[in-house]
Amino acid sequence: MTRPEPGPDPAARAGVGDGRASVTTSIDAAGARLVHLEGEVDIANGSAVQSALESALAGSPERVTIDLAGLEFMDSSGLAVLLAIGSEVEELRLRRPTAIVRRIIEVSGLSDVLRVDP
Amino acid sequence: MIARVGKEPELASSASRIQSFFARALRSPALSVVGPLVGPSPRLGYEFTQTGTAPRYAAYAESDLPPARKVSVSPSSAFSDLRFAIYLGDSTGHADLLETNADHLPITGRLAKVTVPFGDRSFTLVASPSGSLGGTLSAWLPWIVAIGGTLLALGATLTTEGLVRRRGRAEHLAIEVGRLYGEQRTIAETLQRALLPDELTTVAGLDIEARYVPGVDGVEIGGDWYDVIPYEDGRILVVVGDVSGRGLGAARVMASLRFAVRAYAEEGEAPGSILSKISRLVNLGRDGHFATVLCALVDVDRRECIVANAGHPAPLLLSAGAGHYLTTVVGPPVGVSSGVDYDSVTCSIPSSATLLIFTDGLIERRGESIDVGLERLVTMAVGAPSGSLDSLLTSVVGDMTPDGSNDDVAMLGLRWQR
């Protein structure tokens, strides 16, 4: 049985950089802050996405979860963004990666570095 | 003269020197360097000419040299055990001195000297270990070259960064913006190529070819590199690496990793051990960059290759009309976690095989899985017209990135002659 997942608030969704990615925040079932990263992240918009994630994490929460269910594509520049965010917070969890995103994490030897939940 | 910003250029104090410098500089599309300019505030001058369009523009800037050319080095710095002096050009006369941390010149004792191209000139670094460094010079030479290379790259980085900043201001004042892209790309490429080997080592029984193709997105320098380093026992270490991000910071990390790999290779370290050691030199939290690196120690005669992999795409082995990726133990990229031990695997190479080692710019394409790109590379490489290794690399790069890659591409090809 799957429990309903809280999604981002569509009214709060705003395009990042060239508009191919969006970063929104919501509160998960346990009351913790959840960041949704959607769209595509690559070399062209990586630094804009990183800035948007850093803004979304303002107030520096120690534990951060980024939901990747809506992230359709990410290349090594996107990995760099996630690793940079991970180096700025105490604990970073990723969850619900798409197959493309899961695969780039695996082939880059990061399965033991980035904590990925189903 | 369209615009001038900041202090009066030191070069302006000598009309004849201006004339002769610009007469030389305007003929050259590369970075032209003049100096050291002595006066109340000693400086080094640089000039870029925009060629190929009319009207032509030149931008000229100067950067300050330290007072009396003397820099102080923090005792905790990697350079603290080293006396060094950097000169413009290949002479080591006092008139060409840019900066030093030594109290007395010329530096004497056990000396190491390297010259690195910079624009239309070069920098020469003279260094000598100070204090308690033991052993013979030859034992320390790799370290001195490593540190010296990093230092020179750092110097070039800082001066180029300063120049780009100054250009930015002048641009607001006067010059049209659009053409700057090509120009900055040229600066970046100049630096990138200065950091790559001029000539690859030659090895009996093996063809070696390399490619470096700058990405088409953006104008900033990338951090891809390749290297081929001979071992004393006749084996060679081949290295392909990719520092995350772009800009001069990425180039600086690339330079320090490249020289560190060379230093460890000089000491005969194995690939896994090299990756473990260089992983201590980069820290994503501190440097803002990490790197994927593939090291392969190749024994041509025994047809054997010991491969260690830090988050890098696996090499593609082409043999008898088929292609497959070597199975490697993929550890994390260097710089993302501390205290990583990298395992290596030993691969056998069939006769007349070709090995391609490349950065992900070759295979990544927007919107598709990395597996699709890896599969496409096998198809393109196997289907390439038969010919020399050089023509194979040209064909593969052309077919894989027909409109240019967004990211930089570095690639090494090795082909066993029998």
Image: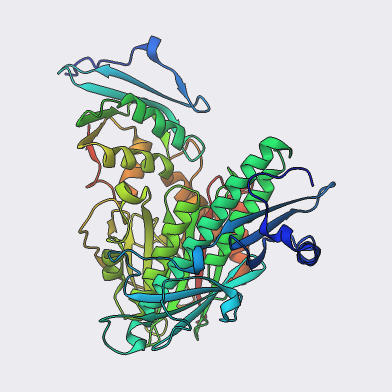
B144 to A94, vertically: above or below: below
Q: Residue at x 50, y 62 (%)?
A: B155
Q: Is residue A92 left or right of residue B71?
A: left
Between residue A95 and residue B51, name the one nearer to us. B51
Residue displayed at 60% across by 52% down? B163
Pick the front one: A11 or B378: A11
> What scheme was used to colour the molecule?
rainbow
Where is residue B39? Give x, y as percent: 63, 64
Residue at the front extreme of this rendering? B40
User: x, y (%) of residue B375?
Assistant: 46, 50
Please report the residue visible at 37 percent of the width from the left and 47 percent of the height from the top.
B288
For residue A12, above or below residue B30: above
Q: Pinpoint residue B75: horizontal percent, then vertical percent.
A: 29, 66
Q: Is residue B415 above or below residue A116?
A: below
A83 lies left or right of B324: left
Splitting the image into 4 quarters, where does residue A59 fall?
top left
Is residue B219 at all visible to an observer of this figure?
Answer: no
Residue lying farthest top? Answer: A11
Give left or right: position of B89 versus B109.
right
Q: Position of residue B212 (x, y in %)?
A: 56, 60
- Displayed quadrant of residue A28: top left
Report the label total: 0
Please tell me which residue lies in front, B325 or B264.
B264
At x 18% / y 16%, what residue is drawn? A3
Residue A31 in view, yes or no: yes
